[in-house]
Amino acid sequence: MHDHRVPRPHHDLRLAEDGVLRSWALPKGLPTASARNRLAIAVPDHDLDHLTYEDATKTVVDTGWWELESRDERRTVFVLHGRTGSRRFALVRTRAAGGRSAGPGGLLLHLTSQQPAG
């Protein structure tokens, strides 16, 4: 997880998969309660060496590993194992009017009500 200060404050969620970092901008950070979804904006994949990259406007705020639980065309469920513990999330593709997908950027990040033990 990166904390960005530019162009406006936000966090970036980065998950290593298939030799790249899949990335999403989180304008309001990770959700802290299952009743509060957060916008997740898909951004281009990054090289793996970007995982620890920091500069004057970006810092690493957490590292760890992730575990995929399930994935389909609408939803990806995963557990983040970070410095302070493990949390289960779902990235959910939203639907536009008429039931069509809102596109690759239309995602909500949801903290699931069922969390890992410990």
Image (cartoon, rainbow, N blue to C red):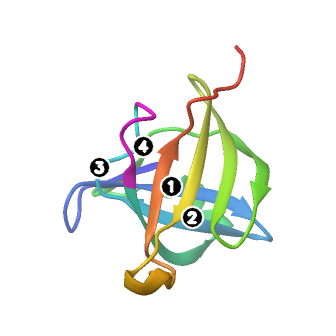
- Of marks 1 and 2, the one in the foreground: 1
Report the predominant secondary structure element of the magenta stretch: loop
Which residues fall within the magenta stretch?
Answer: 33-38
Q: Amino acid at mark 1?
A: Leu
Pinpoint residue 75: horizontal percent, then vertical percent. Answer: 64, 61
Q: Residue at label 1?
A: 13
Residue where numbered disc 3 is placed:
28
- Residue contact at pointers 4 and 1, CB within 8 angstroms: yes
Question: On the image, numbered disc 4 is attached to which residue?
Answer: 30
Whole-number angstrom distance, CA of label 3 to CA of label 2:
21 Å
Tell me whether the residue at label 1 lies in contact with that at label 3, contact meaning CB atoms closer than 8 angstroms. Answer: no
> Which residue type carries mark 3?
Lys
Q: Is residue 77 left or right of residue 54?
A: right
Given contact means CB atoms under 8 Å apart, are the residues at marks 3 and 4 in contact? no
The spot of residue 106 in percent (x, y) is 43, 73
Height in image: 116 above or below 88? above
Camera-near label (4 vs 1) is 4
Left or right of 108, for residue 113: right
Q: CA distance from mark 1 to mark 3?
A: 12 Å
Q: Which residue is mark 2?
A: 50
35 drawn magenta: yes
Q: Which residue is located at x 59 percent, y 27 percent? A: 83
Name the kind of residue labelled 2 in the image: His
Q: Earlier in the sequence, mark 1 or mark 2?
A: 1
Q: Is residue 84 above or below residue 37?
A: above
Q: Position of residue 79 (x, y in %)?
A: 68, 40
Residue at image x 36%, y 46%?
Answer: 29
Image point (40%, 80%), residue name: 96
